[in-house]
Structure formats: structure tokens, C-alpha cells
Image (cartoon, helix red, strand yellow):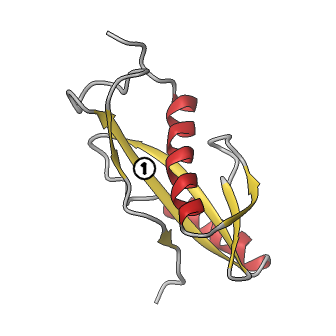
Amino acid sequence: MGKPLTQQELHNLAMNIVGRRLEADGYEFMGVNSKPKKNPQFVCLKEKQLHFIVVRNVSFPEDPKNYDENLMAKMKEHAEKHEAKAYYAGVGLSNANDRTLPVYLNEAYIVDYEGLIEIKDDE
């Protein structure tokens, strides 16, 4: 049995997954913050538009698309002050052999990440 990843290591893994996707999609990084409780994790620029992105690693069986609405409402308010858009990036991480076990160092894992979720005003 390997060593289970710590919360910070899981968070860093989620950040790397989202960061690589952002880079591939042409986002320019203005600021990166890898502390899980310090939001947003990424401040990016794309097509002259500022983007604030909150990244969370989500353990199985939770749905990585569900987010803390209070936190994201605050983030949206913060983003608007800077004429930025707010996004949530939930990354589901689970053990590839048994999803109920923790993710272990140097062992296979499953990534459930479908991209950024834009936080819009309530209709």
C-alpha cells in the first residue's frame, strides 16, 4: 500500500490538472495561489478578459460540479469589482483500483473534471 495523498497534495494535483487545461486553452496566468482556503486559486487573462478561478479537489462519491454557493457568490462579487468573470473548477479525484480508497502517492487515480463552471447572476 502506498502513502495516501494529503489534502494539500490533492489540492496541488487538482491545481495542476486545471492549470494545464487553462494553459492549453490559451489562458495567461497573472496570479496563482496554491493555498486551498485563499481564493481564487488562479487569476488569468484571456482575450483581455480577467478570470478568477476557484479550484477544489473533490473526493468520491461527491459530485465535483457541486460548489459552495456562498463562497462563489462572494467570489463573483470580488470578481465584478475587478471587471472579471468568476469560475469554479471542481476536480474529482479517486483511486483507480477502488474508488472508496484514498488516492495514494505514485498510484493510478481517476480524474473527473469537465472544465470551468461560470458563476453567473441568478436569473
Please tell me how many numbered marks the rendered image carries. Answer: 1
Which residue is at 53% across, 74% downward?
119
Residue 28 at what x, y percent from top left? Answer: 70, 66
> Residue 108 appears in which quarter of the rendering?
top left
> Residue 114 appears in which quarter of the rendering?
bottom left
Q: Is residue 36 left or right of residue 65?
A: right
Which residue is at 54% across, 68% downward?
25
Name which residue type carries label 1. Val
Residue 8 vs 75, above or below: the answer is: above
- Return the residue at label 1: 91
Q: In the structure shown, which secondary structural element does the residue marked by tag 1 occupy?
A: strand
Residue extending furthest toward the bottom: 123
Of residues 100 and 77, the one nearer the viewer is 100
Residue 68 visible in this rendered orientation of the protein: no
Residue 46 at what x, y percent from top left? Answer: 67, 76
Quadrant (top left, top right, bottom left, bottom right) of the N terminus: top left
Which residue is at 31% across, 46% downward?
62
Residue 32 at what x, y percent from top left? Answer: 72, 51
Residue 79 vs 17, above or below: the answer is: below
Of residues 87 and 121, the one nearer the viewer is 87
Residue 13 at what x, y percent from top left? Answer: 51, 38
> Residue 109 appears in which quarter of the rendering?
top left
